[in-house]
Image (tube, rainbow, N blue to C red):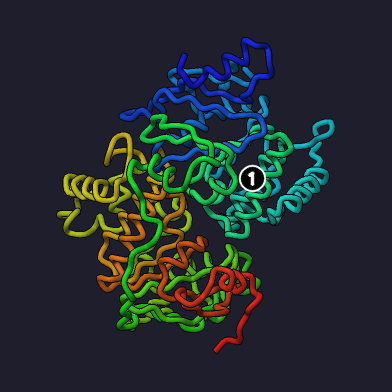
Amino acid sequence: MSEINKEAQVVEKAGGEYPYVVEMRNITKEFPGIIANDNITLQLKRGEIHALLGENGAGKSTLMSVLFGLYQPEKGEILKNGEVVTIKDPNDANALGIGMVHQHFKLVDVFTVLDNIILGVEPNTAGFLKKKQARQKVINLSKTYGLNIDPDALVENITVGMQQRTEILKMLYRDNEILIFDEPTAVLTPQEIDELMSVMRGLAKEGKSILFITHKLNEIMAVADRCTVLRKGKYIGTVNIADTTKEELSNMMVGRDVKFVVDKDEAKPKDVVLEVEGMCVKDSRGKKDAVHDVSFQVREGEIVCIAGIDGNGQTEFVHALTGLSKVDSGTIKLLGEDITAKSIRYRNTHGISHIPEDRHKHGLVLDYSLEENMVLQRYFEPQFEKNGFIRFDAVRNYANDLIDRFDVRSGQGAITSARSMSGGNQQKAIVAREMDRDHKLLVAVQPTRGLDVGAIEYIHNQIVKSRDSGTAVLLISLELDEVMSLSDRILVMYEGEIVGEVDPKTTTVQELGLYMAGAKRQERR
């Protein structure tokens, strides 16, 4: 037995209360071409918040999927309160009081929010569904934990942030005692993150035990009691948060020191690349404007950020800008040309690169290989096509080059199915594809969502490098640290309107937060 289990063995022999509510001992999980978990031991104390930290593809989500019954390990065992248990599927996990909020949402698009939350545990009497009682419980939970949702909205029509809240409520609805949060804050606003941190502390005080996967070191330092670090599928160590620092954790995670501040020179904006004038876009129901009378410009050589709380029209704006939906009124000009009614392909081939908010719905074809995804918008170019046939050797060489340059990790390299990759590496693949294409405007929506600190450092540097080479960058981000450190200008969107423009060098996070909340709404010029 490994050294890490000695404390538990001593207590066990002494007849005291077993210190760990869950133990994963010597877990090994393999996939084709890769050992995702290599002899990992993880111990969760009763009533603690235990962070699980590691680079993209380090094996964190895989380890938690083993605990939740989604995967079966090749080696190792799982203990609950000192007793070995078998978890064949999520139903077994739920029966043991284990719940999980997944990084990639497990929701049914055509169901309502309420139906998704109660799915599988629907209250009924004599076979008849009793939704009223469930609805009230969901509403009460959402109010208690500050997770505002519309229970009647279809999942396919709600924002990514709302989907995340639905996943959290799904777990809370089941009254689980062991809660796994897999990147729960990736799409939440700073205010919502603070609320969730408070919720997690409250749950821990109630005696619930929390496993918390995140890449955000500030969150670990703020809320976790202990942290276990994985690197490339191996166990690196477990530390008490009170005895460590962000810098030490990042070094354990990536094996080197990481810069937390973006290095960039003063912007030197030149000609206008993007001009939006009077844009209005209806909401999903077509009843009111989700985007109302939005006008601004982005010049080559500058990074302009649209900041705002999730659900204030950013998604609808980006969809209209990139051609995913239609503009109801107003114009979009790219390098002086009106592209308001142009197709997505036209925009792609005439200078727009787009890192989308939802990488699964708009960024990747999940059942295609990594190399096929890398050329989705370019397979028809002479470099990759000859006489109507795709040059697969050229595609393979191009994909391998991007994989190397952007450190995209996958079990089988270029032929790996996109679906089988970790979320962070899926994101890196999209970023690599979009930034490598010949473009004049980069529309980057949450570009570092789900990425570790090393990858964030690299992506930020690439965005700045793109700016300095003459690209106009439009950044849409919910991360205030990213907004403040990467932007040259910040536009704040509230209820579908641009309500203010601020300079990141002269404003504060607090002032920006007031704009985002609508407290400093200005008269439009």
Residue at the location (70% across, 54% down)?
146
In the picture, which quadrant includes the C terminus? bottom right
Residue at the location (62% across, 45% down)?
167
Location of residue 233 in the rendering, given as x and y in whole percent from the top left corner: 38, 31
Is residue 351 among what the camera can see?
no
For disc 1, the neighbor class at 10 Å (few under 14, some 14 to 19, many from 20) is: many
Q: Which amino acid does label 1 sit on?
A: Ile
Instruction: Spot the residue most to the front.
Output: 243
Front residue of 127/270: it is 270
Residue matched to label 1: 168
Location of residue 92 in the rendering, given as x and y in whole percent from the top left corner: 62, 24
Query: 277 above or below 371?
Result: below
Front residue of 281/498: it is 498
Is residue 387 among what the camera can see?
yes
Location of residue 481 in the rendering, given as x and y in whole percent from the top left corner: 48, 62
Query: 216 above or below 226?
Result: below
Front residue of 113/285: it is 113
